[in-house]
């Protein structure tokens, strides 16, 4: 019997909450959002009909509090809860609590979640069902495994090993171990990260397949026991074991392999009595053999690519199945049409080892074009906190062919105006335009073969000169506009033509001086002491500069926010910080200081004052955005100061430790 959902609470945040609300509006289902302190100003809160505040910021205080979520549903009269992905989406206990409260859980049964909740038990179940699996071992949350237990398990499984959180995903709680001497530390770190992100530190070890493809199959099951597939997705482009580019269909899967993969996925779904939308994940080796990884008992982040190639709204399908409806013919008879590629736009510094970043999103603007879909969790004027995953949006391109989708997505990302927090946009564009990716020759080792500095080489001196000069001219136009007298004088006018206007900016961390002046011959300019050839200014406002350099005319957009000029043009994008003319010398950090690369919480202090340490030694570990980041000393020395302790909340730039050259320490 079908019982339509009347009001839905989404027990999640960001883009997935907004995505679910969008389908609910089309289905005339009332909606409820829940939000933490840090999320109060994000778009998903306003996208809902009603919203309930969850006091606090950490996941443990807010989105992992089943009691608060169910209470919010009761108070608003919501008869169903959609868990999104992450948080409690794969928590069987939460699904049972919903049922006990008379609330429909939009997802599989608690029994199905339990069956896949233990990765090792899941593998045994799949092995029994005839689905190929890799060997492995599990270490639960009850006690820390000792070195002997880990070594024995590793000897049976073989190396290299993958350490992976048993109750989560998204790359958190995951480590690769090639040297058994690193195994104990890798397991301990993965357990801490898994406990923080998912509330359970259970991890398992399994054989690591070198540079496989990551292929997954979308399955859907209804309450009558029918399970069908909606084809595969390729998710091989990963950093830190977390997907950043996904596509459907896979460029390497032919009709024969597709039939085998999809049949294995349906077999897996039937083996656990799957209900709702789920994903069966596989690794595919170079020989074309595939092995079961896990079943994600929820909607995947990358579900939009499946929606675009099949024309099926997976959220609507989830809601209909949760209400008791059977799988419609449109789904069981679906066909692949076209190609879709999704890029995950993160707030992160990819050049600095993919460090997550936080801060203000001043500008978030994409040009609307046919085939482009944006599922965003942030908008202009919002702020990225340190408490949650740093994904800003999913940007998806769809076209008749893979190449159409790839080009559309690369062009849309490259032309977007993204100001404020540092993003991985340049990396995504570079991957999409790279020859191996364009040919579909990808695997999970892609970014190891294509490191950031090779994929995203620095722009040439000509591009740098255009952006720096345009920023200086836009700043000067703004100053002239605000001048209390003679505001109508041309930008850059000087009484003394022999004295150029001078401004300095930081570009890629280094100061660069820009000079310019206007004379009878036009514009004379230098950048970093080098003349800018053929410079000619056609017009300049604080927001746009029409500039000719070396005979090429370009329009350069400049957005000034505080002391930073954000520059956008066909040459690329830059954030240029104006250098203070008279900086405060007391603001400089002590020599040998190790600074926090981002806001976070200190979770481990590995040394004490007076210790002698080698280059590369981990001094402090901080947790930010549900991941651990080791702070290592770049050179050998003596630890002379440790101003932080475990539990200390730090901001970006906070001094975490001071490691000095022993010779300097002796002279003191």
Image: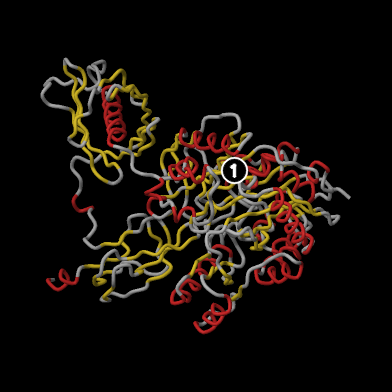
Residue 124 image offset from top left, x and y in percent: 71, 72
490 up-or-down from 297: above or below: above
Pinpoint residue 125: horizontal percent, then vertical percent: 73, 69
Corner quadrant of residue 204 = bottom right
Between 31 and 555, the residue placed more toward the observer is: 555
Judge the density around disc 1: few (<14), some (14-19), many (≥20) Cα neighbours within 10 Å: many
* Extreme-bottom residue of the structure: 148
Q: Which residue is mark 1?
A: 44
Where disc 1 sits, the SS reads helix
Residue at left 53%, top 65%? 173
Q: Is residue 609 left or right of residue 111?
A: left
**x and y percentages locating residue 325 in the rendered image:** 84, 48
Name the side, left or right, on which 337 lies relative to 599: right
Q: Residue 205: percent from the left, percent from the top?
A: 57, 72
**In the visual, does 10 lie left or right of 193?**
right
Q: If the image is split into quadrants, where does the C terminus sit?
A: bottom left
- Which quadrant of the figure has residue 496? top left
Q: Residue at x 28, y 33 (%)?
A: 462
């Amino acid at each position: 019997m079908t019982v339509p959902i009347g009001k839905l609470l989404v027990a999640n945040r960001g883009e997935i909450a907004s995505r679910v609300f969008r389908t609910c509006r089309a289905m005339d289902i009332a909606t409820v959002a829940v939000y933490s302190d840090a999320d109060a100003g994000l778009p998903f809160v306003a996208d809902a009909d009603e919203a309930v505040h969850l006091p606090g910021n950490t996941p443990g205080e807010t989105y992992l509090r089943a009691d608060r979520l169910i209470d919010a549903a009761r108070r608003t009269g919501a008869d169903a809860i959609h868990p999104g992905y992450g948080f409690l989406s794969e928590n069987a206990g939460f699904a049972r609590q919903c049922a006990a409260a008379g609330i429909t859980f939009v997802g599989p049964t608690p029994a199905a979640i339990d069956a896949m909740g233990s990765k090792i038990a899941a593998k045994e179940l799949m092995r029994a069902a005839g689905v190929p699996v890799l060997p492995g071992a599990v270490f639960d949350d009850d006690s820390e495994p000792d070195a002997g237990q880990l070594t024995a398990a590793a000897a049976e499984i073989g190396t290299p090993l993958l350490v992976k959180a048993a109750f989560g995903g998204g790359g958190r709680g995951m480590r690769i171990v090639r040297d058994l001497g690193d195994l104990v530390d890798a397991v301990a770190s993965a357990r801490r990260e898994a406990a923080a992100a998912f509330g359970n530190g259970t991890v398992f070890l399994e054989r690591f397949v070198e540079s496989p493809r990551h292929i997954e199959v979308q399955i859907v099951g209804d309450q009558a026991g029918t399970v069908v597939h909606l084809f595969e997705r390729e998710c091989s482009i990963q950093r830190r074991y977390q997907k950043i580019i996904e596509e459907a269909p896979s460029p390497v899967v032919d009709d024969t392999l597709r039939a085998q993969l999809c049949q294995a996925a349906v077999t897996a779904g039937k083996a656990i009595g799957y209900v709702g939308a789920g994903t069966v994940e596989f690794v595919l080796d170079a020989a074309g053999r595939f092995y079961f990884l896990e079943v994600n008992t929820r909607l995947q982040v990358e579900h939009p690519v499946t929606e675009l190639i099949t024309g099926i709204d997976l959220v609507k399908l989830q809601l209909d199945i949760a209400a008791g409806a059977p799988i419609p013919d449109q789904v069981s008879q679906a066909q692949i049409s076209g190609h879709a590629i999704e890029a995950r736009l993160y707030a992160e510094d990819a050049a600095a080892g993919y460090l997550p970043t936080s801060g203000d999103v001043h500008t978030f603007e994409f040009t609307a074009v046919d085939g482009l879909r944006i599922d965003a969790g942030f908008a202009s004027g919002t702020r990225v906190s340190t408490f949650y995953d740093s994904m800003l949006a999913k940007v998806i391109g769809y076209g008749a062919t893979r190449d159409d989708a790839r080009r559309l997505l690369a062009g849309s990302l490259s032309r977007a105006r993204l100001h404020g927090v540092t993003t991985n946009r340049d990396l995504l564009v570079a991957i999409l335009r790279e020859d191996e990716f364009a040919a579909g020759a990808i695997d999970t080792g892609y970014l190891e073969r294509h490191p950031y500095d090779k994929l995203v080489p620095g722009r040439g001196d000509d591009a740098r000169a255009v952006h720096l000069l345009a920023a200086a001219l836009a700043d000067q136009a703004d100053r002239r506009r605000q001048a209390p007298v003679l505001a109508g004088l041309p930008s850059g006018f000087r009484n003394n033509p022999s004295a150029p206007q001078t401004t300095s900016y930081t570009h890629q961390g280094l100061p660069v001086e820009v000079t310019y002046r206007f004379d009878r011959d036009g514009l004379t300019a230098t950048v970093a002491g080098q003349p800018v050839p053929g410079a000619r200014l056609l017009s300049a406002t604080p927001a746009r500069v029409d500039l000719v350099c070396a005979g090429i005319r370009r329009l350069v957009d400049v957005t000034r926010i505080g002391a930073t000029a954000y520059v956008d043009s066909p040459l690329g994008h830059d954030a240029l910080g104006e250098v203070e003319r008279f900086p405060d010398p007391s603001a400089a950090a002590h020599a040998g200081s190790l600074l926090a690369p981002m806001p976070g919480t200190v979770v481990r202090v590995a040394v004490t004052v007076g210790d002698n340490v080698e280059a590369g030694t981990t001094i402090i570990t901080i947790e930010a955005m549900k991941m651990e980041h080791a702070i290592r000393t770049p050179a050998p020395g003596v630890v002379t100061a440790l101003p932080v302790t475990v539990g200390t909340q730090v901001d970006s730039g906070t001094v975490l430790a001071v490691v000095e050259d022993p010779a300097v320490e002796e002279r003191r």
